[in-house]
Image (spheres, rainbow, N blue to C red):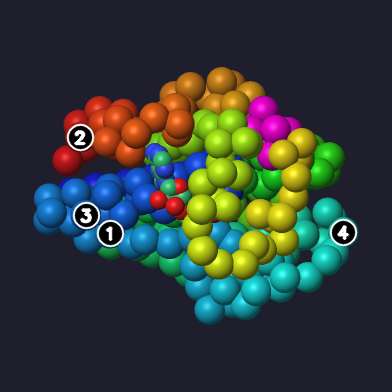
Amino acid sequence: MAGRFITFEGIDGAGKSTQIDRLQTLVEASGRVVCRTREPGGTPVGEKIRGILLAEDMTPETETLLFFAARAEHAARKIRPALERGEWVISDRFTDATYAYQVGGKGMSGERVEALERWTLGGFEPDLTVLFDISPAAAARRLAARAGAEDRFEAMGEDFFAKVRAAYLERARRRPERFLIVNAELAPELVFDAILRKVSPWL
Ligand SMILES: Nc1ncnc2c1ncn2[C@@H]1O[C@H](COP(=O)(O)OP(=O)(O)OP(=O)(O)O)[C@@H](O)[C@H]1O
Ligand SMILES: [Mg+2]
């Protein structure tokens, strides 16, 4: 049985973790091994970089380089080995997030990010990317209802998230073969149905 690499993308509070829980349960029930992971993070080095990224102020250039440092480690030491073992890898965010947050949200050069992507990942990409599309206002209401302190990204305003959302959508429209765009404002059951329609042929 072949492994699959599925990534979940979308602005903070879109509902990614909620649906990853469901998908993990379903895929494991089918007898597959699931490697659940997240970005930034996923490895010991990556989790340390995550701590810096979510807490410290830094330039968009520094931020982008740290994301790719963590991602290079993540792909080489965790994701690719799991896929080679035939596991399903489900990652809460991956490269598309850098195009959405650092390029779309913060104005980093897309060409520089493409160069970093080529250098660190070659052509390595997910088999499927589920994009959770939601208005920044609706996502902010969900985050406000959730307990816990905000990180540096969650604290950005709705204008920032509007740019991130637009960048995600543009990227997805240009890559329809890899992306599934779901309306994340629907009830959780309906969001999951849309994901299942895409994933069940692989099970
Ligand atoms: N479809 C939905 N409808 C309404 N509320 C939802 C839906 N999906 C998730 N929620 C709720 O919204 C909040 C945010 O969801 P969740 O933590 O899954 O989002 P997330 O995308 O993982 O956020 P983050 O990017 O901050 O990790 C949670 O309190 C969750 O219970
Ligand atoms: Mg989450």
Horizontally, residue 143 falls left or right of residue 6, namely right
Q: Residue, x 77% and y 59% (percent of image)?
A: 63
Measure the C-alpha gap from mark 4 to mark 2: 42 Å
Q: Is 62 above or below relative to 45? A: above
Compute the Cα span from label 1 to label 4: 35 Å
Kind of residue sitting beneath label 2: Ser
Dominant secondary structure of the residues highlighted in magenta in the image: helix
Q: Which residue is mark 4?
A: 59
Residue numbers of the magenta segment? 161-167
Which quarter of the rendering shows the C terminus? top left
Q: Secondary structure at mark 4?
A: loop
Looking at the image, residue 179 lies above or below residue 157: above
Rendered view: 73 above or below 197: below
In the image, what residue occupies the spot 62% across and 77% down?
A: 48
Distance from the alpha carbon under mark 3 to that under mark 1: 9 Å
Give the spatial CA distance, label 2 vs label 3. Answer: 13 Å
| Residue at disc 3, secondary structure | helix
12 displayed left or right of 151: left
Name the residue that disc number 1 marks.
Answer: 34
Q: Amino acid at mark 1?
A: Val
Out of 47 and 175, give the one closest to the viewer.
47
Identified by mark 4, the residue type is Thr
Please name the amino acid that badge 3 sits on: Thr
Tag 2: Cα neighbours inside 10 Å, few (<14), some, or many (≥20)?
few
Residue assigned mark 2: 200
Residue 173 visible? The answer is yes
Do tag 4 and tag 3 residues touch (Cβ < 8 Å)?
Answer: no
Q: Is mark 3 within 8 Å of ligand 1?
A: no
Q: Secondary structure at mark 1?
A: strand
